[in-house]
Each structure stands twice: as structure tokens, then as C-alpha cells.
């Protein structure tokens, strides 16, 4: 019997399971404490819901129109101003800032926009679960390198290290991207300046794009 034409595309095979969906459902059905995701137990600051109420008021009906696809001008200008201080340079809000519906959409757009079939993507283990399926969905080939503890006991998040020689060995003519997640999820490791400089040097020497998936108190920022 032939397979149904209603089946998902072949490129999606192996991506039907999701750890977040599985454990959230397990926590719900067993009454366990769900440590997989954040559940804020405090109200948002007053200025947040007051601003939302102002936007939704009848007097501001023009806010309910289609806006600029890359992000509302007022929003991208505010983001560029804030992150310009972090990067110590002026950011062009109209060319260097893109607003998406969460980091998942940003990551998906990056993989789809840059990875050709056969391109290699370096992924540092342990990694956030979506990196591998998004690489494969774009036709890319994931190449893994582990963070290893530098001590035998009393290991902290800072004690997990990349082997510079092992990392360098993964770069070749097929390498298109490396995904850098700092602070690392799930280890909590924050890469040092020397580690970041080492990764940047490899990217420059091999003409490789670095997707920096960085979560901070200011929200989730994705940069390249």
C-alpha cells in the first residue's frame, strides 16, 4: 500500500517529537513540578500593561494596521539604541534589526536563509533542542563538538570547556555556520572573552557565520 499524500514532507522526518511538549504534558498529568520552562509568579511592571492598554485604546486605532515587516520603526529604533550600548557601536535600526515572534522564528529564518543542502553546521553540545532539526530541515549537516568538564569534581558551569584544537578541526570548506549559545542552555556556561575571541578568529579565517543565541535579562537576542 502506498503512503498517503497527506503525510508530512520527507524533510520533516525525525522531528515529530519535542522534549518541551513531552515533559510539559508529563508534568501536567503527574502533578510534578515543571522545571523545564519559566513560570513567572509576579505581575508585570505597571508601565508595561499601561503601555499595552494605551496602544489598544480606541484613540490609537492606527496601531491596528499592518506595520513594517521587519519591525515597527518605533520598536526597532528603541532596540538599536539599547543594543548599541551593549555592542559599543551605533546600530542602523532599519538595516541591522529584525523583530520576530520569539527566538524560534529568528533561528528558523537564519537556518533557512543561509544553509544550503550539504552545508555543515557546527553545534556545541549540550545544545538547545531545535538546532539539530532546523539544520536538517534546511538540508544542512550537523557537526557536533562537546563541552567537557575541566575538573574531576566540584564542577561549576565555568568549568565546561571547548577544546580549541578539536573545534578548529571541524572547520572546512563546507562549514557554513556555527551556533553559539551563551549562557549555554542547559549548562548555564557563559563564554569568556578569550573563548569568544577564539571562535571569532576561526569564523573570520574560514568565512563562517556565527549565530549567537544569547538570552539575557533584557530578553532574547539573536545576532550574527
Image (cartoon, rainbow, N blue to C red):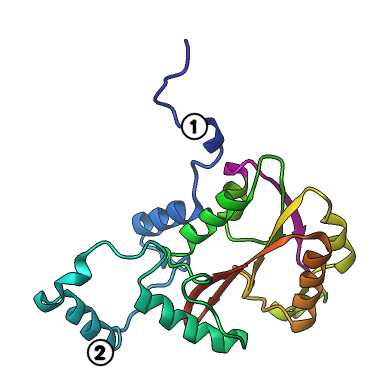
SS of the residue at dot 1?
loop
Q: Does the magenta segment cover residue 141?
A: yes
Label 2 packing within 10 angstroms: few (<14), some (14-19), many (20+): few
| Residue 177 occupies quadrant | bottom right
* Mark 2–mark 1 CB contact (< 8 Å): no
Q: How many marks?
A: 2
| Residue 222 occupies quadrant | bottom right
For the view shown, which residue lies furthest in the left direction? 58
Q: Residue at x 48, y 13 (%)?
A: 2
Quick one: 28 or 54, which is closer to the camera?
Answer: 54
Look at the image and tell me whether residue 110 can be seen: yes
Q: Residue at x 71, y 78 (%)?
A: 191
Which labelled disc corresponds to residue 9?
Answer: 1
Instruction: Tell me residue 120's x, y (percent).
Output: 73, 48
Which labelled disc corresponds to residue 38?
Answer: none
Relative side of 189 to 39, left or right: right
Q: Residue at x 62, y 88 (%)?
A: 88
Quick one: 161 or 48, which is closer to the camera?
Answer: 48
- Residue indicated by mark 2: 46
Q: Which of the two labelled residues, at mark 2 and mark 1, occupies the earlier sequence position?
A: 1
Amino acid at each position: 500500500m502506498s503512503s498517503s499524500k497527506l503525510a508530512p514532507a520527507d524533510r520533516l522526518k525525525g522531528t515529530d517529537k519535542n522534549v518541551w511538549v513531552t515533559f510539559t504534558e508529563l508534568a501536567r498529568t503527574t502533578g510534578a513540578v515543571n522545571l523545564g520552562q519559566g513560570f513567572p509568579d509576579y505581575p508585570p511592571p505597571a508601565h508595561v500593561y499601561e503601555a499595552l492598554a494605551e496602544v489598544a485604546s480606541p484613540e490609537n486605532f492606527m496601531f491596528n494596521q499592518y506595520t513594517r515587516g521587519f519591525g515597527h520603526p518605533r520598536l526597532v529604533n528603541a532596540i538599536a539604541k539599547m543594543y548599541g550600548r551593549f555592542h559599543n557601536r551605533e546600530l542602523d535600526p532599519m538595516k541591522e534589526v529584525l523583530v520576530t515572534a520569539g527566538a524560534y522564528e529568528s533561528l528558523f529564518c537564519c537556518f533557512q536563509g543561509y544553509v544550503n543542502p550539504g552545508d555543515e553546521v557546527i553545534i556545541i553540545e549540550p545544545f538547545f533542542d531545535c538546532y539539530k532539526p532546523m539544520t536538517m530541515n534546511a538540508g544542512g549537516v550537523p557537526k557536533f563538538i562537546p563541552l567537557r568538564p575541566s575538573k574531576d569534581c566540584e564542577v561549576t558551569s565555568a568549568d565546561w570547556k571547548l577544546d580549541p584544537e578539536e573545534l578548529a578541526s571541524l572547520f572546512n570548506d563546507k562549514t557554513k555556520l556555527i551556533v553559539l549559545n551563551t549562557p549555554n542552555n542547559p549548562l548555564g556556561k557563559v563564554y569568556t572573552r578569550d573563548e569568544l575571541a577564539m571562535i571569532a578568529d576561526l569564523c573570520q579565517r574560514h568565512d563562517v557565520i556565527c549565530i549567537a543565541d544569547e538570552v539575557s535579562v533584557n530578553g532574547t537576542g539573536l545576532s550574527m
